[in-house]
Amino acid sequence: MTRIKPHFQNEAINALLFKIVCIFWLIVKLMGWRMWTAYRLFPTAPVFEGLDQIPAVIHTILLVLSLLCITMLLFFDKNKFLIVGLLMIEIFSCLLDQNRWQPYEYQCLFIIFIFMINTNKPKLVITSFIFILISTYLYSGLGKLNNGFLHTVWVQIILKSFLKVPSNITGQHYIYYAGYLLGLFELIAGTGLLFSKTKKIAAIALIIMHLFILLLLGPLGLNYNNIVWPWNMVMILYLYLIFIKKQERVITFKDVFQGWNKLVLVVWGILPALHFIGYWDGFLSSSMYSGKAPKMIICITDTNKCKQLGTFYGKRSYKICNGQAYIELQNWAITETDAIPNPEIRIYKIIQKKLEKKYPAAGLNYFYY
């Protein structure tokens, strides 16, 4: 249970949270706008092959309509007509390209959804909001408890690239396995948000975690994947507004069993667990920087047959490419669209099929790892 002040049931406070979500959504949409168009080299990956027949201009129109709807919601607070329209636009746009199924997009969709289904029920809004936040931290923490996180994120990104720790130290067993503490930290702090006595210290701990991520990935650190910077900032705001201010009223999570809130319970509470057995997407399960996501390398035999892609060639040498030019799909997506691709093998295969069709003479070879 989490205690919450009576003023959190005030429509003015709910309106503030709603506006914060809309402002954040606008920012990330504008930062990664190329991912929401089809005027790019990075291929789209529609849910159904027939959706490839949709003209590229429709993608752009959907983006413009989305931005207009979000902007209008800043002035016409929680207008149901606008929210329904926005949700339909976003869902259709995401059907046109599964790479748009970004974690922040998914979270924004559901936060706006809970405001729509709980009109004049501020208690239910806050309860479902809290449920989404806690689910995010719990599944994100659990997702980091694997060897891929230790090797890729902890050792390569944090210790070597960011902290410049030499290999003879990172190779020490106790240093290597200490990386598990990061996943446990997030898991324990997320659990702490559940209880009145620990929610405040847990929120402070998570804010410190977000500040570290901003330092790690921000301009003073690796200066990488800048679209996650505003997301970390807005999560800090959520934590402060909902958990740190002293709360008095008790909220129980039985509220998520009411009406359409049950959909939030299923999608955020149950379905992410299926990711651990391969039946639900990582991006839809708060699996971010977990080290588990598969990557794709494209080796190029004849670069003259795909000169357009020259901007995205990798700089280091890959043995699997035998000295040939290559492209890392993740770096290509970030370079061109400021967003990482949805790391699912089925999506990689759609992209592979499109590239084979577009550059048949380039001798492209594909490797997943």
Image (cartoon, helix red, strand yellow):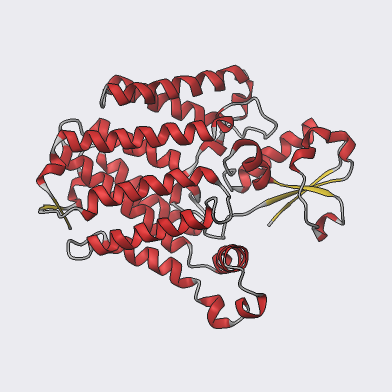
User: Considering only vertical position in the picture, is 167 above or below 80?
Assistant: below
**Residue 2 placement, left or right of 94:** left
The residue lying at 19 percent from left, 30 percent from top is 119
- Image vertical order of residue 88 relative to residue 356, above or below: above
Q: Position of residue 267 (x, y in %)?
A: 36, 45
Q: Is residue 178 left or right of residue 123?
A: right
Using the image, determine if residue 29 lies above or below residue 55: below
Q: Quadrant of residue 98?
A: top right
Residue drawn at the location 77% of the way across and 52% of the way down: 315
**Which image quadrant for residue 81?**
top left
- The picture places residue 181, in percent across and down from the top left corner, at 44, 72
Is 231 left or right of 247, judged from the image as shown? right
Q: Could you tell me if residue 360 is visible in this image?
A: no
Seen at 58% across and 39% down, the residue is 338
Task: Find residue 51 and report its horizontal and vertical position in percent.
Answer: 59, 25
What is the quadrant of the N terminus in the image? bottom left
Question: Residue at coordinates 48% horizontally, 63% vertically from top-left?
Answer: 144
Front residue (pair 209, 361): 209
Q: Can residue 44 be seen in this snapshot?
A: yes
Quadrant including the C terminus:
bottom right
Residue at the farthest front position: 220
Q: Is residue 184 left or right of residue 281?
A: left
Q: Nearer the viewer, residue 118 or 254?
A: 118
